[in-house]
Image (spheres, helix red, strand yellow):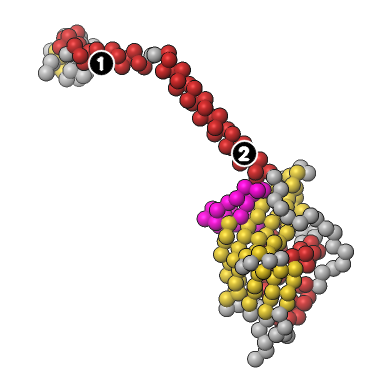
Amino acid sequence: MTKLICPECQRENEPERIYCHDCGAKLDRTAVIASRPADARDKERQRVRNMFDPHRAKMRLWFFRVCRLVLGAFLGAVLIQMLLPPDVAPEKKALILSQVGLEVENAVTYHRPTPLQYTEDQVNQYLSSALKGKKALDKPWLDFKRAIVGFTEGKCSVTVERSFFGFSVYTTTSFAVQVVDGAIDASNKGGAIGRFPIYPQVMQYLDIIFEDLWNALDRERKLVAKANAIEFHEKSVVLQTAPAQ
């Protein structure tokens, strides 16, 4: 192995060094270069030529441009899906004050055994009147407009519509709900922002955006927790209260 002798301090340095290990003087690498096999020198020259090959540089540039284009198209599609409104019932003005809350309160207080069944429209009409004018639901830059429920077999979804400078933004969360020992047991089944679906594993961490709504409906949640059972069917919900002992 060729050693590099420092011209200043005469120290033997490793062949890969450019400056002396002791005094820092620049080493003469002519001997090292000359001692390399011809094929190694040719390979190194070819590697350098490949690095500066204009054709390869164009291919790399083209590749990165295509990647940026695909990524931009994907992010644009996601943004459009988030801004599109989901399939929810159109907003209706409540003509009369809904009696759903009063009926549920009487049923759980007096332990009436007759089940209570309500449609989506009835529950949404109640939510419209119960949440009307609650300023605590307004977030910075987002004004609360309404909350809409949807019922399918074994599952309940809640969609919140907020206004961002007049443009509606929708967030949805879905649950499988049961009443267990006087408490509501809800397992997240996913959700959406606009029409862009969110997996349950991610949605459970985004539930914080609905915290103000759950607080506003605290009375209603406590009433439902006092029921004996709750069942969700297509477009309807059934509450079963425990009979008096």
Would you identify the image quadrant in which residue 88 lies? Answer: bottom right
Q: Is residue 126 magenta?
A: no
Kind of residue sitting beneath label 2: Ala
Q: Residue at x 24, y 12 (%)?
A: 42
Magenta residues (range): 191-210
Residue count near mark 2 (Cα–Cα under 10 Å), binned few <14, some 14–19, many ≥20: few
Q: What residue did someone put label 2 on?
A: 77
- The answer to whether residue 25 of the structure is visible from this angle is no
**In this picture, residue 127 sits left or right of residue 34:** right
Kind of residue sitting beneath label 1: Lys
Residue 38, how many percent across, how many down? 19, 11
Residue count near mark 1 (Cα–Cα under 10 Å), binned few <14, some 14–19, many ≥20: few
Q: Of residues 4 and 42, which is closer to you in this image?
A: 42
**Does 86 appear above or below 21?**
below
Q: Residue at x 46, y 17 (%)?
A: 58
Q: Residue at x 69, y 70 (%)?
A: 237
Q: What residue did someone put label 1 on?
A: 43
